[in-house]
Image (cartoon, helix red, strand yellow):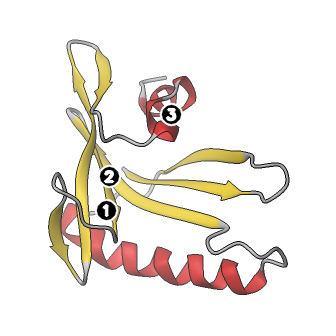
């Protein structure tokens, strides 16, 4: 399953709106770098359309989910991320073990919260 998480950021007051979108279209993990390039273009387009003076009004992080993990792509390098090609990196963001999702100290808050983990749980 393709997964794309995003945040819409607002200037006044400093509120973040978070949403996780699960796309029913299956993708191969080897296509993640190409998908991240497309979402980067979408982010740039959103910046041009946004009337507020925000450097990044929309954050799109595509990924994929397997029975044991959620993987998200990023353009920012850090010690736990691996290069996947096309100037993009990826990380295991959540791990599914013993019937529950667990996260790491580096997992971003939108994914660790109840709404984030619930979005990746079986329905």
Quadrant position of residue 47: bottom right
Residue 73: x and y in percent read: 32, 62
Q: Residues within 10 Å of mark 2 (few under 14, many from 20)?
A: many
Q: Could you tell me if the residues under marks 3 and 2 are in contact, i.e. CB atoms within 8 Å?
A: no
Residue 5: x and y in percent read: 50, 52
Q: Which of marks 3 and 1 is in front?
A: 3
Residue depicted at 85% across the width and 55% down the height: 12
Q: Could you tell me if the residues under marks 2 and 1 are in contact, i.e. CB atoms within 8 Å?
A: yes
Q: Name the residue under label 3.
A: 116
Q: Which of marks 3 and 2 is in front?
A: 3
The image shows residue 76, relative to residue 10, as above or below, that is below
Q: Earlier in the sequence, mark 2 or mark 1?
A: 1
Residue depicted at 75% across the width and 49% down the height: 14
Which secondary structure lies at badge 3?
helix
Q: Name the residue under label 1.
A: 27
Nearer the observer, 15 or 84: 15
Residue 13: x and y in percent read: 83, 49
């Amino acid at each position: 399953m393709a997964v794309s998480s995003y945040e819409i950021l607002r200037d006044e007051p400093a509120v973040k709106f978070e949403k996780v979108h699960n796309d029913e279209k299956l993708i191969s993990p080897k296509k993640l770098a190409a998908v991240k390039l497309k979402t980067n273009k979408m982010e740039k387009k959103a910046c041009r359309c946004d009337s507020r003076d925000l450097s990044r009004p929309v954050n799109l992080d595509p990924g994929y989910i397997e029975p044991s993990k959620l993987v998200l792509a990023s353009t920012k390098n850090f010690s736990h991320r691996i290069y996947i090609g096309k100037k993009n990196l990826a990380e295991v963001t959540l791990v599914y073990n013993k019937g529950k999702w667990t996260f790491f100290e580096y997992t971003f808050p939108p994914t660790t919260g109840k709404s984030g983990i619930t979005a990746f749980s079986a329905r």
